[in-house]
Image (cartoon, rainbow, N blue to C red):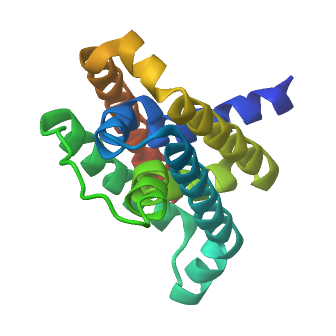
Amino acid sequence: MEHVYNYLLAFIPIFVAIDVIGVLPIFMSLMDGIKNPLKTKIINQSIITALSVSVSFIAIGKFVFSVLGVEIYDFKMAGGLLLLVFAINDLLFGEKEKRVMTSTIGVVPLGIPLVVGPAVLTSIIITIDTYGYIPTMVSLLANLFIVWIVLLKSDFIYRLMREGGSKAFAKVASLLLAAIAVMMIRRGVKKK
């Protein structure tokens, strides 16, 4: 039972950091006027990019830390502070501007930083340290699958939630992210 619990605990911070419902309004504004076959191609490109960046970070993140002499508790505190800044910025200022359409829109800004940005990468490293590689990888894959489904069904979900519902969900996710950030800072200070 504890083993299953670790998978759930690894899933939650990554889910909150990705905040797919909060990304939905930005995604919808970026996809405005784009027809379905191209839209699906862009969504696939963004998920492949997000997965590639995440797996690369999982593979070399700790090596980079050892080269730089950074301990995991240092990263927990720095990552917690960074997540807290992201959460506060989103809670207080929130609106993210519409970006211009380019041929690499699935890579930047969708794959990085909207789906997988600094908050997600920070959550991944800390989740690895807390729950291990396998629960983190399974949680990452499950989260990216959810993102893929939500983006594919974005028109339906957006009509269902409307812009206000989507923004409200994003604010709750930001509040949870702030709480996770404070927990990470506390754990980093305790380990030191």
Residue 102 in the image: above or below residue 15: below
Q: Residue furthest bottom?
A: 67
Q: Nearer the viewer, residue 63 or 191?
A: 63
Q: Residue furthest left?
A: 93
**Residue at 75% across, 34% down:** 6
Spot occupied by residue 50 in the image (x, y as percentages of width and height): 57, 57
Q: Nearer the viewer, residue 53 or 97?
A: 97
Q: Nearer the viewer, residue 131 or 28?
A: 28
Spot occupied by residue 45 in the image (x, y as percentages of width and height): 57, 57
Judged left or right of residue 113, residue 128 is right
**Residue at 24% across, 16% down:** 164
Residue 88 in the image: above or below residue 5: below
Q: Which quadrant does the N terminus fall into?
A: top right
**Residue at 47% across, 18% down:** 156
Spot occupied by residue 13 in the image (x, y as percentages of width and height): 54, 38
Residue 29 in the image: above or below residue 8: below
